[in-house]
Amino acid sequence: MWRIQIGAIALAVLAASACAHLKGRGRAGELVFLDQGWGEEERRIFYSASQGTRLMPLRWFLALEREESAERFAASDHVARYRFVEDTASKDNPERLPVGFARDVDAATGEEYVGFTCGACHTRQISYRGATIRIDGGPATIDVVAFTDSVFRALDRTVKAPDKLERFARAVLKDQYGVGSVAALRAQMEKALEVVKLQALSEGAAAAHATVAGFGRLDALGRAGNLLFGQLDPSNLRATNAPVDYPHLWDAPTYDWVQWNGSIMQPMARNIAEALGVGTHTLFVRESQGTRVEVRSSIRVDNLRLIEQQVEKLRAPRWPEHLLGAIDQEQAERGRRLFRRHCASCHDPGLTRPNEHGKRFRKATMVPLDLIGTDPTHAVSFNERTVDLKALGLGRVGIAQALELGTWAIRETKYEAYGLSPEQRLEWDGHRPNRWRAPLAYRARDLSGIWATAPYLHNGSVPNLYELLLPAERRSKRFYRGSTELDPERVGLRVEPFQGGFELVTDRPGNSNAGHEYRDGPRGKGVIGPALTEEERWDLVEYMKTL
């Protein structure tokens, strides 16, 4: 039989400095947790429970120097530029890894790895007048791509610079340091770098025409396809040209379809795909003379279920008036009536009919591209992409079919290993089958907590709620992402230029801010409702603070 290794060695970070924790009124320098239905136990699980990812040995993290100096790569001042959220030290996190990074031990080798878990991309921290507000399940503002590239440039420099390599090897190997062990370590580092380049995470074959994601965005589906299928056949690599904002999670388990393009139905499949996309050890094994394909994976499906159970408890954050200012209730009521008239048909569509298990879910409204008129790149790229699976005894198939097959195989293998009963399997699956699709449409969802999720549209090309209600020609054509400072008037994050910020330019592929417009004339081609007056726009903004 032959084997194919799939996965990635991706990113890592360490952070220092503990934060004060406070519910209620925030003072300068204090961290405020809003009431979202979680306590410390739920946060600990979401922030640090391992999905079984294998990003890089923890020893490497602790020893790695920056590319341009001998300073620790993981120093808090260096990490802060990528907007990772600091986490307080605990008995389970002595290195003070940031929110969303988990430790996990490889059972076969005993090597301790650091891995990327849900909380990194789905925990937001915003600030206003000196107070810092934690939004659990909110879209992170991290720049994953820039951070990853920086990590592996530093590792590459360490391999090539004898003085760096010596310091790194002594820190990693300790009393095992020697000529032979250093050579073996260097070989492991070179192999890691080759895998990263192949999968187009760091100057790889598919990177040439990639759209820069910047803070708070990632072409998650594009990268997942590269991570999963790039090693099967290099022709499967594609440019990551369709970055989208990280979605908020507080209502995700209640929907029939998830992702911006409504491509995944089952919660377990969604979470397996997420774990695969950030780097696991997943091995497909096929008998040389047969058609049977087995899968071996480090993915912790048990912990995926545990994390999902916490997300099921999570509630949308309510606008904290004591921190951000009182809501004008009269104005909000006018906005509510406008919302029911112009917005509710898409954003409050009701429930599905009961499925075969008697379960009902929130219905995702799928809005065709030619109606909504927003940037089509994300949906079109996923719809048109195919991958060659001849290495697994199959032919060329659509990316949705390939991901459905891969997640199904991992799920079945893990469920068998855990000895789950049919009833348990159904529960872990969220009472939904594993189905994938690739529609030429985007999903409209309930807007609870929308005030905490800027920027807007699927690609984050509109900086605040006020501009979202303007005709496209009046929206910002360029603005800076990466600030965590809230603008409570327009309801978004600050967008002025600042050192270290990322300038989003909306005339570049994947970045268009067109569509979802209110203007007079026929519906379609981006027009979804009649023109609004200035007063009506502000009424709607005020109402959406209440959601």
Image (cartoon, rainbow, N blue to C red):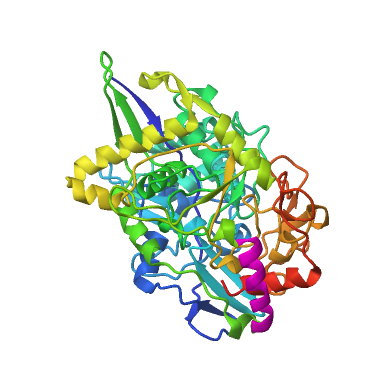
How many numbered dots are placed on residues in this image? Answer: 0
Percent across and percent down for residue 490 are 72, 70
Is residue 341 shown in magenta?
Answer: yes
Secondary structure mostly seen in the magenta stretch: helix
Percent across and percent down for residue 14 are 49, 59
Percent across and percent down for residue 130 are 64, 79
The vertical placement of 143 against 296, above or below, is below
* In this picture, residue 241 sits left or right of residue 303: right
The vertical placement of 20 against 114, above or below, is below
Is residue 194 shown in magenta?
Answer: no
Which residue is painted at 59% across and 80% down in the image?
Answer: 29
**Could you tell me if residue 485 is visible in this image?**
no
**Residue farthest to the top?**
289
**Could you tell me if residue 498 is visible in this image?**
yes
* In this picture, residue 413 sits left or right of residue 450: left
Q: Nearer the viewer, residue 524 or 276?
A: 524
Quadrant position of the N terminus in the picture = top left
Quadrant in the picture for residue 343:
bottom right
Q: Nearer the viewer, residue 353 or 163?
A: 353
Q: Nearer the viewer, residue 358 or 322?
A: 358
Quadrant position of the C terminus in the picture = bottom right
Which residue is painted at 41% across and 73% down in the image?
Answer: 37
- State which region is magenta: 328-343
Percent across and percent down for residue 193 are 51, 35
The vertical placement of 159 against 511, above or below, is above
**Residue farthest to the right?**
473
